[in-house]
Image (tube, rainbow, N blue to C red):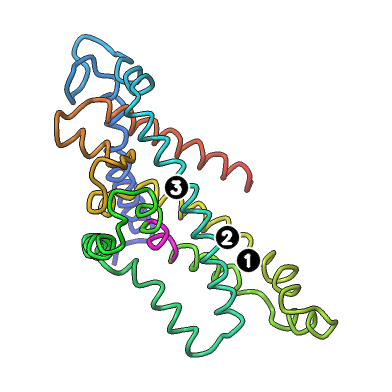
Amino acid sequence: MMPISAFRIFFQTGAWAVLAFLVLPLLIVIPVSLTDTSFIGLPRDGLSLQHYENYLTDREWLSATWTSIWIGVVVASLATALGTAFSIGCWFLSNRASQIARWILIVPILVPPVVQALGFYRFWVQLGLIDTYAGVILAHTLLALPYVSISVFAALANLDRNIIRAARGLGASVWQTTLAVVTPAARPGMMTGFVFAFIVSFDEIVSVLFITVRGVTTLPKMIWEGIQENIDPTIAAVATLLVLLTLIATAIGALRRS
């Protein structure tokens, strides 16, 4: 039988190996973004910021970035509002029908993205939403709704129903109880759901490729087109900036909790 110390070393080594497998591909993007060549590759003669300059001065890249940001904010707002209302309603009902409704809302997470995108395409053609901002926002909202509902349900899991009965017994209406008692309890889940919804929208590429042509260009679509056409190293610069922003946001969140 292996001693406990050997087990500990084995699992620690495995954990570090998994971490390296996940992190190293991200770290490789950084030197690639500083390449002095006009194609994807490591620097040859020295480090260069030309691809960062290209990103910050190119109208197409900046326009695609801004499009992804404002669409993400709109989608996150809509998904948070709709997902919160749905979750609170199911929490109040707490019956068989609400359980079925919750499972149905989670289905988009289980369905392959290509199947979802194909469904959006066929339905959006009939509605005239192909290659429109409204079509992209609606599709992203439907994809983000499950994440919001899961977050809000988790926040409401520990809410004591006796508090609701006490509020109703003291004369509060259903709306007053919802706004004064249930919504504050759901607020942490709403904030988490908003962040997840924004990330889902900002990162979504499959449905965008199916339901847009040239009228709408998001940042993921711009990156995809760059990979398909000429493998522009600007893609590595964009990826590095996104990684840095993610690390900064994670650090801020960790510091606020500590």
**Image height check: is 85 above or below 90?**
above
Instruction: Tell me where residue 118 sits by quadrant.
Output: bottom left
Q: Earlier in the sequence, mark 3 or mark 1?
A: 3
Q: Position of residue 43 (x, y in %)?
A: 22, 17
Q: Residue at x 18, y 26 (%)?
A: 40
- Between the residue at mark 3 and the residue at mark 2, the CA separation in whole angstroms equals 15 Å
Q: Is residue 141 magenta?
A: yes
Looking at the image, is 149 positioned above or below residue 6? below
Numbered range of the magenta stretch: 140-145
124 or 176, which is in the foreground?
Answer: 124
Query: Image point 21% across, 26% down: which residue?
Result: 232
Q: Does dot 3 land on a helix, a strand or a loop?
A: helix
Residue labelled with disc 1: 186
Q: Which residue is mark 2?
A: 190
Badge 3, how many Cα within 10 Å: few under 14, some, many 20+? many
Residue density around tag 2, few if under 14, some if 14–19, many if 20 or more, within 10 Å: many
Viewer-proximal residue, 181 or 211?
211
Question: Which label lies toward us, 3 or 1?
Answer: 3
- Residue found 39% across the figure and 30% down from its top: 241
On the image, numbered disc 3 is attached to which residue?
72
